[in-house]
Image (cartoon, helix red, strand yellow):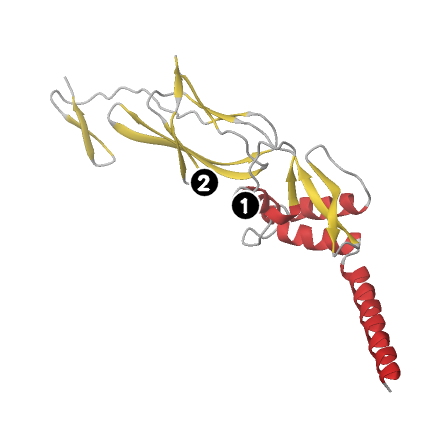
Amino acid sequence: MKKHKKIWTFGIIILLIAAFTGLGSLYYTKDRQIERIVANLQNPKAEMAKYVIPSTPDMNVTDSSLKPLQSYFKEHKKAARRLAYNLRHNRDSAEIQLVESGRYFIIFPKYRLRVQCYRPQVQTNHADSTLYVDRKNYGQMQGGDQNYYQDLGLVFPGRYHVLVKAKVNGRQLDADSIVNIWSNKTVNMKIKTATFQIRSVPNGFIYVNDRKVGKLT
């Protein structure tokens, strides 16, 4: 009786292992993993860090640092579909490559994205300008002669909100833009100003946007 019980138990274990292996072979296929990775890549609310390896060990991989990349593919559905197709057909790009990295349950290959990192900078044309990227304050920009710069440090590619604020002749001005970063480029955020003359009666007051800015002489 005990012998039959052992055989029965062993048989159940074998069936469970076979079922697990069969289901795992479906769930962890290369195409299924690519499908889940690309789906997360289009959702800025999804956890993405577990699917990414940076091109340099100096880059800190977090869900937060990958949100600009997710925002880019959320806005560019065609690019996401093209990426999924290329990954399935082993057509890696310089920016994003599919690599085998580790195993699931020691059996199934684990795939992740190797993503290129960049070190862009932002340029503006006014002294005492402050840079904000995705609402983070990067501090005052440095330089001279209408060329002021700030390095963003290492970043993943993606869609960034870049804002430069400056006080010019007592007025608060800014340059505001959504920028797609896919290289070590310099992002031009020059604040445009204009010079003009006003002619009117002597001693008249000048108002711009309901704000008194001067007096005619």
Horizontal arrangement in the rendering, residue 137 relative to residue 153 (left or right):
left
The residue sitting at 88% across, 78% down in the picture is 7
Residue type at mark 1?
A: Lys
Across and down, in percent, residue 128 comes to 32, 23
| Residue 50 placement (x, y as % from top left) | 62, 49
> Vertically, is 162 above or below 88?
above
Q: Position of residue 15 (x, y in %)?
A: 84, 73
Res 194 quadrant in image: top left
The circle drawn on residue 67 is: 1
Crowd rating for badge 2 (residues with CA inside 10 Å; few <14, some 14–19, many 20+): few
* Residue 134 numbered mark, or none: 2
Q: Is residue 127 above or below residue 25?
A: above
Which residue is depicted at the point 84% across and 78% down? Answer: 6
Q: Earlier in the sequence, mark 2 or mark 1?
A: 1
Residue 191 lies, in percent from the top left, at 39, 26
What amino acid is found at the position of numbered circle 2 in the picture? Asp
